[in-house]
Amino acid sequence: MEERLQKIMAQAGLCSRREAEKWILDGRVTVNGRRAALGSSADAQRDKIMVDGKPLVGAEEKKYLMLYKPRGYVTTMKDEFGRKTVAALVRGCHARVVPVGRLDYNSEGMLLLTNDGALVNALTHPRHEVGKYYEVRVRGRLDNIPRLSEPMRIDGYAIRPAEVVVLEQDEQSAKLRLMIHEGRNRQIRKMCEQCGLEVRRLKRVAIGELPLDPSLKAGDWRELTESELLYLQNISAMAQEE
């Protein structure tokens, strides 16, 4: 059965549909020896689909993992500088999973990994409004904490206002719960920097209504339960209808 090329690539766990479209436009994809065009269709069982000169591997069994990412790991599967990656932590899952979004090197907490490209796109695209929740320990200009929930620009991009709840506060520091949508590179740290606040610890505690499993220790992972997966699949289904 013929399907859009970007859908086939996403189902194979290679990338999201959005990323697949970019690869097609960049000329990295061929079908039966011919350069693919955006909007091209193919039959994954019949046609020879190549990406960067390598055959597209058929769809794998879908894997959905929850990892408690420790500090000191990068959220990539390979690192050119030789730093520790989350790939090493989930090696035992026996699948080519990729991170859903990112957590920077010095941040910790909940990270989802999967080989379901459609789900990656649904959870990471800002228009799908899947909130990411963090607990953040800060010090500095504590009187500026309310500014975190106001409109601001990060790297020239107007981010949506965060939802901020003060969980604890004394004269020296505060523990906050922040909810953001975009998850841009080092977004919370840059938001705090603009407000004169220093981030001492940053931990992601939930994605949407899915919380970090409190039984997981830093570096541990497990597969998602049926109910957790159903929740995420409902998000993915709604995103594909848009």
Image (spheres, rainbow, N blue to C red):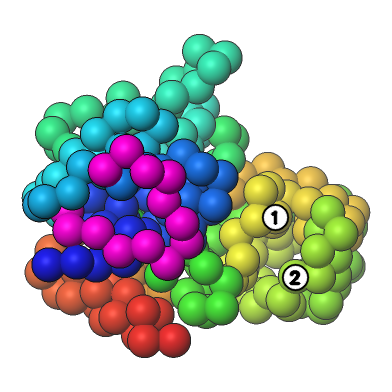
Point out the tag, 2 or 1, that comes first from the N-terminus: 2
Q: Quadrant of the C terminus?
A: bottom left
Q: Quadrant of residue 208?
A: bottom left
Label 1 neighbour load within 10 Å: few <14, some 14-19, many 20+: some
Is residue 117 covered in magenta?
no
What residue is disc 2 on? 159
Q: Give residue 141's position: percent from left, percent from top.
A: 89, 57
Picture layout, residue 122 above or below residue 49? below
Q: Does residue 217 appear anywhere in the picture?
A: no
Which residues fall within the magenta stretch?
A: 32-44
For the point 17% across and 58% down, which residue is it? Answer: 43
Q: Is residue 161 left or right of residue 78?
A: right
Question: Quick check: is 43 in the magenta stretch?
Answer: yes
State the CA–CA distance, disc 2 to disc 1.
Answer: 9 Å
Q: Is residue 225 above or below residue 22?
A: below
Q: Position of residue 167 (x, y in %)?
A: 60, 69
Q: Residue at x 30, y 29 (%)?
A: 54
Circle number at residue 41: none
Q: Which residue is mark 1?
A: 187
Name the amino acid, label 1. Gln
Q: Is residue 194 above or below residue 51?
A: below
Residues at marks 2 and 1 touching, judged by CB atoms closer than 8 Å: yes
